[in-house]
């Protein structure tokens, strides 16, 4: 079993920044892709950004140029640096990791990001 602990959410004004962290622990043999998803009220969960073990990244068009995903493989931790935040970024943000040969998927509990003046 894998446990994911997220931190870093909160309330920020438009144009501000936040940094999310997600640390994985437990029965980890090999973490493959790590990523962040978000879900706003009344909307489906959507991909924000993903990073492979080798460091390749993919971003949603809506966050390109503003958000940066990174990971520390030694710490089994993934980060999401969010700059130039907009009200439409308001959502619960979830960490997602894929583990092992068959990419078993685990989700974090979610952390609220609210962008408002």
Image: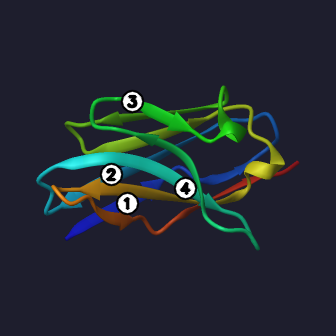
Secondary structure under tag 4 reads: strand
Answer with mark 4 or mark 1, whichever residue precedes in sequence. Answer: 1
Q: Please give the residue where the numbered disc 3 appears in the rendered image.
A: 56
Q: Which mark, residue 5?
A: 1
Neighbour tally class for label 2: few under 14, some 14-19, many 20 plus, Cα within 10 Å: some
Mark toward the start of the polypeptide (3 vs 4): 4
Disc 1 vs disc 2: Cβ atoms closer than 8 Å? yes
- Cα distance between the residues tagged 2 and 4: 15 Å
| Disc 1 crowd, CA 10 A, few/some/many (<14, 14-19, 20+) | some
Where does the image place residue 52, in percent across and percent down from the top left? 34, 38
Q: Label 4: which residue?
A: 37
Q: Residue at x 41, y 57 (%)?
A: 96
Foreground tag (2 vs 4): 4
Q: Which residue occupies the foreground of this view, 32 or 70?
A: 32
Nearest the viewer among 110 and 62 is 62
The outermost residue toward the right is: 117
Among numbered discs 1 and 2, the one appearing first in the sequence:
1
Which secondary structure, mark 2?
A: strand
- Judged by depth in the image, the label closer to the viewer, 1 or 3, is 3
x, y percent for residue 55: 34, 29
- Mark 3, Cα crowd under 10 Å, few <14 / some 14-19 / many 20+, is few
Q: Position of residue 8 (x, y in %)?
A: 53, 49
- 15 or 105, which lies in front? 105
Q: Earlier in the sequence, mark 2 or mark 3?
A: 2
Residue 14, quarter of the rendered image: top right
Q: Are marks 2 and 3 in contact (CB under 8 Å)?
A: no
| Residue placed under numbered mark 2 in the picture | 23
Where residue 111 is drawn, which disc sits there? none
Q: CA distance from mark 1 to mark 2?
A: 5 Å
């Amino acid at each position: 079993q894998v446990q994911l602990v997220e931190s870093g959410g909160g309330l920020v004004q438009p144009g501000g920044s936040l940094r999310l962290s997600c640390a994985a622990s437990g029965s980890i043999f090999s973490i493959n892709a790590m990523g962040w998803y978000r879900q706003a009220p009344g909307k489906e969960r959507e991909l924000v950004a993903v990073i492979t073990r080798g460091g390749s990244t993919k971003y949603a068009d809506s966050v390109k140029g503003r958000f940066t995903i990174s990971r520390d493989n030694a710490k089994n931790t993934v980060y999401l640096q969010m700059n130039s935040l907009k009200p439409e970024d308001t959502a619960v943000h979830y960490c997602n990791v894929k583990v092992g040969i068959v990419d078993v998927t685990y989700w974090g509990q979610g952390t609220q990001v609210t962008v408002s003046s």
